[in-house]
Amino acid sequence: MAPLYKKSMAERAEDTFLYVFLSIVAFTAIYPFIHLLVLSLNESVDAQRGGLYFYPRVFTWANYEYVFTNAALLNAAFNSVARTVIQTVVSVFCTGMLAYVLSRRDFVFRKSFTFLIVVTMYVSGGLIPMYLLIKSLGLMNTFAVYIVPGIMSAFNLMVMRTFFEQLPDGLVESAYMDGANDFSIFWRIIFPVSLPVVACIALFVSVGEWNTWFDNFLYNSRNERLNVLQYELQKMVNAVQQSNDPLEEGLERTITPYTVKATLTIIVTVPILLVYPFLQKYFVQGLTLGAMKD
């Protein structure tokens, strides 16, 4: 048997330096989240002393109990999940269909429509015209205001269109020869082999929808039943920032704004951290996964 390849001292030193450097970078990125988690699990008054780094000094669930006993929080969480799921599915599907049309070289108005869409990335009507448009469409104080205005994104459209243009033409041509129509080609052929870009766009949309709260403030602030989680948490943060006094006092615990803000940050971050690993695997796949060769 041929002797195994042995790395030289220079290569070993280079690998060691690389591992150490990447470990420092990873620790720098992860530690702020660890620190917030420690604060959220520590007794509030004790946390104000400082000196908390990797584990709680006085462990307690009191901060989470205070947040989740808020009567409006559960309904707001349901609204956030509903808008995120619905908007992600609708936006990805509609954006994908339009991107497929614009990617077809035989579409006569391909360049004209693309130009009009790209212009919207640089020119905006502004907040007041948008508010008047939403009001004239009758979307004020309705759940639909979370879905309809954000169905299409010019940036996401351009990303998907560029991806579709790189797919082999033989995929579509062979399907046409078998008698398939455009919708069948998109849904049964183009969409399945485009999972990497679909997962990427789905992640962009879901993170944006989960984190947004300003549209709730503008259009649905009068209907508390339609409040989303981020808006409720934003109100709680504003409330705790206005005073440094304890929020809740009892025989065994005191809740302070210092740990409440850390707890709220953990609450809104964890769902995204749980979703991302399931989408990450698609980012490393090839552009024409499972497709026939041209």
Image: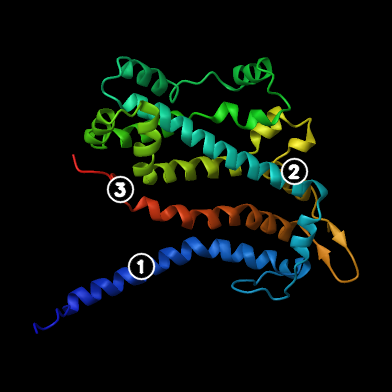
Return the residue at label 3: 289
Toward the viewer: 89 or 142? Answer: 89
Mark 3 element type:
loop
Report the mark closest to the observer, 1 or 3.
Answer: 3
Q: Residues within 10 Å of mark 3 (few under 14, many from 20)?
A: some
Gap between marks 3 and 2 measured at Cα: 45 Å
Return the residue at label 2: 235
**Residue kind at label 2, given as amino acid type:** Lys
**Residue kind at label 1, given as amino acid type:** Phe
Q: Is residue 96 above or below residue 287?
A: above
Q: Residues within 10 Å of mark 1 (few under 14, many from 20)?
A: few
Q: Is residue 69 above or below residue 167?
A: below
Toward the viewer: 200 or 180? Answer: 180
Q: Quadrant of the C terminus?
A: top left
Q: Position of residue 87 (x, y in %)?
A: 57, 36
Q: Is residue 127 above or below residue 293?
A: above
Q: Position of residue 93 (x, y in %)?
A: 47, 34
